[in-house]
Image: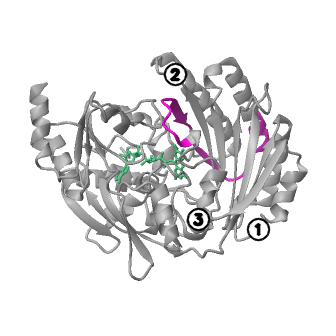
Amino acid sequence: MSAQIDAYAALRVKLSPSANIYVQNSKDFGTATLRWSQYKSPDFTVVVEVAIEDDVVEAIKYANANQIPFLAYSGGHGAIAGLASVQKGIQISLAKLDSVEISETGTTATFGGGILSKKAIDTLWKAGKQTVTGCCEATSLLGPGLGGGHGLLQGKYGLISDQFVSARIVLADGTVKNVSSDSSDPDLWWALQGAGHNFGIVTSVTMRIYDAPNEDFWSFESYVYTQDKVEGLYERINALWPDGSQPSGLINFSVLMRNPAVDAEKPILIFFIVQNGCQPAESIYTQPFRDLGSVFTQSGSGAYTDIPGWIGLDEKSPSTMKLGLSVIRFPVNVQNYNLQAQREVYELFAKETSKTPEFSNSYIMFEGYPVHGVKAVPSESSAFPHRDDNIIIAPVVTYDNKANDPELDAKANEFGEKLRQTIFAASGQRELHAYANYASGSEKRESLYGFEPWRLQKLEALKKKYDLEGKFNHYASVL
Ligand SMILES: Cc1cc2nc3c(=O)[nH]c(=O)nc-3n(C[C@H](O)[C@H](O)[C@H](O)COP(=O)(O)OP(=O)(O)OC[C@H]3O[C@@H](n4cnc5c(N)ncnc54)[C@H](O)[C@@H]3O)c2cc1C
């Protein structure tokens, strides 16, 4: 034990004065390592909270010299089975790398590598600016962004990673690179936009930003439906916005879940429409959903920064908090809703959550982000492989497994996979496309990174060049 303390002291002297080291069982270690999901979570013996880029370099060099695995931590919402391959590791916490610098031209901003979405959104907003971020305030900018990154503004501007202009990245051996489309590493730049977690720790990223005029308000309407409305809801969504044709400023999504206060027996559906530039949301979009007959309808208007609160993704919402639960997602992309599959999935969800009450806080997300901006970017130009897909569906199996019961984990996987396969089978698609940032870890590599053989070949070659020893293989590995 004393040798271990000495070893960290040796690291400490190399770090900047504002960096911290938290050893296991120390006061701050528990808080620093909290995660959104406990399922297959990584195991750490020490946290290095870095304050400057060079601290990341030193932490990685120390880990390599002592053959210790390491993992970056920004928002702590990463949840994929591969994370459990980090055993007795070093967590490199990036929370202090949270600066925002807006360029003189006001067209780009440089963000610290650990910044959370909320700080990025709020800081830009105060300056009359915005850019694509994830919708959840508590996740980071780069956790989502390095895997592509879906967000409310993607209909206009594309994915989070489509906004990248340049980045500083610490590679597996501790060397630092400044990468951009013009740099000497164009393939690394390509990989950072969709498979970025596999190649290094990004200490800062410069992104395109856009004017956000004060009068540019947003509106929402939400509806709570009982089980008899399943077909009606998805039929209306298909009819209004076939094949991803919804306007670029309109987001629709629904959640299937249990809420005993509304229906003690059966799961319910909550459906949201969020629209940019009008007050209230346009009736051509809302009236069909009012006519369907909801138990409860809510609406409102406000600023872009109000949206996470409306849709339950603000930092105080239970869905974004670190509650000590196990959460596994089973994503599958589709083009339109298959009504029969929506019913089958509903019944399956109802049956299993009734039979296994441990899963009663599970839910299924049906995300209809606008896709114009995403599809406008050529597919081959980045490592993000699923630009042609319209809808992201993700069963989210949620349960308390503090007792570490492997049978409960296995049951959760079986449940989530059954839901996913029901949707996939009805989609008529031959390839299962899954968003890497939602993946459970059981997916084929092709599902996460693309079925065109050249994609995985290119990623494999890049791994050999930049991460031969697989230091960054823990999160949605391309290998
Ligand atoms: C409630 C909730 C809402 C979500 N909403 C969205 C959404 O709107 N859009 C969307 O696209 N996704 C969304 N996601 C998925 C999200 O993209 C992933 O969960 C992502 O891993 C979260 O990143 P994080 O920084 O919060 O987590 P972390 O666990 O800290 O990081 C995730 C992975 O990224 C790596 N990483 C983090 N920072 C860096 C960095 N600077 N350089 C290199 N690697 C890094 C970590 O090592 C880890 O492997 C959501 C997830 C949750 C739980």
In this view, the residue in front, 64 or 242, is 64
116 relative to 360 in the view: left or right:
left
Kindly identify which residue carries mark 2: 410
x then y, percent, for residue 35: 43, 37
Query: What whole-number distance in Å separates the C-alpha atoms at marks 3 and 2?
Result: 37 Å
Q: Earlier in the sequence, mark 3 or mark 2?
A: 3
70 relative to 279 in the view: left or right:
left
Q: Amino acid at mark 2?
A: Ala
Q: Quadrant of the C terminus?
A: top left
**Residue lying at 40% horizontally and 32% vertically, measured from the top left:** 41
Q: Amino acid at mark 1?
A: Gln
Kindly identify which residue carries mark 3: 153
The extreme bottom residue here reads 105
Residue 165: quarter of image = bottom left
In this view, the residue in front, 348 or 312, is 312
Secondary structure of residue under mark 3? loop
x then y, percent, for residue 430: 61, 45
Query: What whole-number distance in Å separates the C-alpha atoms at marks 1 and 3?
Result: 18 Å
Tell me where the magenta segment starts and ends, as one range.
Answer: 320-344
Q: Is residue 42 above or below residue 161?
A: above
x then y, percent, for residue 85: 33, 32
Q: Amino acid at mark 3?
A: Leu
Determine which of the numbered discs, if any, sits on residue 57 in the image: none
Q: Quadrant of the N terminus?
A: top left
Query: What whole-number distance in Å separates the C-alpha atoms at marks 2 and 1?
Result: 47 Å
Q: Is residue 322 magenta?
A: yes
**Residue lying at 82% horizontally and 58% vertically, measured from the top left:** 286
Is mark 3 in CB contact (under 8 Å) with mark 2?
A: no
405 relative to 204 in the view: left or right:
right
Eye-nearest disc, 3 or 2: 3
Secondary structure of residue under mark 2? helix
